[in-house]
Image (cartoon, helix red, strand yellow):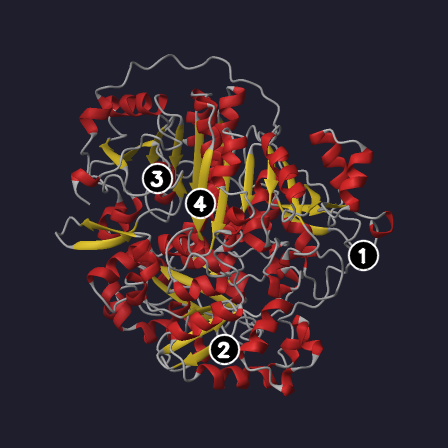
Amino acid sequence: MGDGERRSSDGLPLAGVRVVDHTDGEGTETTARLLADLGADTVRVEPLEGARSRAGEFYDQVHNVNKRSVTIDLGAGRDRERFLRLVASADILVTSFRPGELPRGLDAEDLADRFPELVVVSVTPYGRSGPYRDWAATEATHLALGGVLSRSGLSGRDPLLPPGTIATESVAAQATWSALVAYHHRLTSGVGDLVDCSVFEGTVQGVDPGYGIGGTASGGVPGWNGPRGRPDARHLYPVFACRDGWVRLCILSGRQWHGMFRWLGEPEELADPRLHVLSERFRATHLIFPAIERLLAGLTRAEAMSAGDEFGVPTAGVASPTEVLQNPQFRARRVFAEVELPSGARASMPDGMVEIDGRRAGLRTPAPALGAHTADVLDALPALAAPESVRPVVAPARPLTGLRVLDLGVIVVGAETGRLFADLGADVIKVENGAYPDGGRQSSSGAVLSAGFAYGHRSKRSLGLNLRSPRGRELFLDLARRSDVVLSNFKPGTMDSLGLGVAALLEVNPRLVVAESSAFGPTGPWSRRMGYGPLVRAAAGLSTLWRYPGESEADRTSFSDTTTIYPDHVGARIGAAAVLAKLIQRIRTDTGGSVAVAQAEVILGHLGSRLARESVEPGGLVAGATRDGVLDGLHPCAGDDEWCVVSLRSDEDWVRLADVLGVPAHEPRFADHDGRVRHRAALDALVTAWTTQRGPRECMETMQGAGVPAAMMQRLAELRLDPHLIARGFFHTLSHPLVGSDIPCEGGPALFRHVADPDPTPAPLQAEHTEEILHEVLGLSRERIADLVADGTVEILAPDDRLPAAVDPTALHPTATAPA
């Protein structure tokens, strides 16, 4: 991107906010990058020799755009004083250093105490407290300990480490949301915060949470109650061969099955009306799938996707990374920007993950040269004021109290976005209609409310409203006049067709923030395509990478991303953070605006450095590709299907590991990273001989005691017993009169000094609060509401429907048994 093409931060929501980025690697730099994308003046602080991440050219360029770089020697008195002056000038400080790693007075705690209006965001592997606080960590250890690895891979085979760095990148979105929650609170209360973000905890919450809402195919059963092993779940989002590759289908609702049935030519053997029920179709895959295979075998991926659109069957081609870079949708939306690397090569990198007011919040300036802005930034700093003598005492609060959110969101990403606001005090009104039910209400047991729905819609109220009627539209506009945020994730164009598009909503309330989430974005040739997470993963190249390394490209059985719901939860956090940034801007400007997030672009952003390398070195990004400079090993332990991940980041890690194993550290084959890669099989055998004699927790604790990054493969149900999560108060209890017992749920996104933990109220039944909302918010009389009910404009919950039979939260998960 040339100088003439560089964008300004003017108009972006965080313009005028200063962020100091004192982080280095392990995904922590992404938090500051996301804040920079939203317009913040982000100053990266590096040591004189430069941050470690500069050794990775592609990583550095993707994670540090839109920042300025200053170099500071924190061991020198003058530079230490200049660092404090820089921090004093900031609104938000993002740091990745653990307690004790920095000189006294420069730790996150010290700085939060000295500058009480500052928001200090500490992003560390395990947080600032707890028994794992000082443990070593990598992407792979977080995936193992955080419950993701236990569900990745195929039945009867070893678990499979997911590709890329989806854990650390997802946690960056959660840290960004947490930072803006604290900063919004500071603007309204005058008090900053110390925000303690744990990558481990963020992985449990944000990648594919077992204690949150799941996809439609889960039938409302929470992930923690799934089977112990890795079940055969390929029937959930099946992949079929085409003439030129593979396509994935989502046939979840009765309406989608009807479309598939018509596409197949309405064969008599599939005409059984029972097949309109999801669980019955899972039992009949031996009849359904062969018919689909015959249908698709003669089509190209493009022809299959076109026919899927015609018949209402969500369909996506499975793309390779090289194909992703040439994808017509991504090209039309200019998802990739070309940048010149320090080496002189030109690479394509994702250009941001969110649009603000129709403008991509992406690359404005390339990653800075080391220390390029030291003089400009540091010489302009004012003198350092004396430290505050008294630290303010403020009772923890839910900082979004007073905001009203109209939540039209459905399934996972829609539910989760609104839930994030509800947890922090906003009045979130779920607007829904019985004629078009939220797929998240679907339950495999037939219960009116599932445990999964209880997670995703806690602390919300439900309004039954027919938006397709003129009176319903006017009621919604009346609510919008009295609200702060509107959230939706319908197929692009749906809100406009209802007369409730961005322009119409901002016309009735210019202070409103309107957020839309979609699979592929609001513009481009794929914008109207129905999108689900599995289809987005296929189109964005992730499914191709989420396979066992070395498998034949002709083997469809190797695709291993069917049980995950990534990127729904992290996409919700990206959208919520952008909405909150607009609300922060509104405090200054008194005007609202719009936010748009495409799930595909979230995935591409998380694969950013790898796609940038692929654009320069085509063909190198394949399943099982090693992470830069890190060798991850997956080793069986004593017990039934027990595993431990061991990562080697450096020669020092090898020396520590050799000491644990009792082998010579000077072994020539393993002395450096290249040698360890070349002799991988021998190294794995050496480690496995040790791990198979011990249980997974013993392996982990022994290696961590020696400073080796290691983690047991922890299952979702085991997380509730994890001593670190218990010590940090990670789990809360969620109660609901329609769920047969209390269920464990996650707490807040981080540990704060001044932000209270969530105190959830039960998720609503359909239309449970219609009368209450219309009377309280719009002032409608009981007679007027009765008239609206009579003409079908609104729905209310009949008294007899308020307490149906409770659902059993331990009902079988759909993946507990393979289909017949």
Numbered mark located on residue 157 in the image: 2
Is label 4 in a helix, a strand or a loop?
strand
Label 1 environment density (alpha carbons within 10 Å; few <14, some 14–19, many ≥20) = some
Give, as a three-letter code, the residue at label 2.
Arg
| Mark 2 or 3: the one toward you | 3
Question: Which residue occupies the foreground of this view, 187 or 491?
Answer: 491
Identify which residue is drawn at 26% across, 42% down.
51
Verify CB contact (< 8 Å) between mark 1 and mark 4. Answer: no
Label 2 environment density (alpha carbons within 10 Å; few <14, some 14–19, many ≥20) = few
Give, as a three-letter code, the residue at label 3.
Asp
| Mark 2 or 1: the one toward you | 1
Give, as a three-letter code, the residue at label 1.
Ala
Label 3 environment density (alpha carbons within 10 Å; few <14, some 14–19, many ≥20) = many
Q: Mark 4 and mark 2: span between their CA atoms?
A: 39 Å
| Mark 4 or 2: the one toward you | 4
Q: Mark 1 and mark 4: span between their CA atoms?
A: 37 Å
| Mark 1 or 4: the one toward you | 4
Q: Mark 2 and mark 1: span between their CA atoms?
A: 37 Å
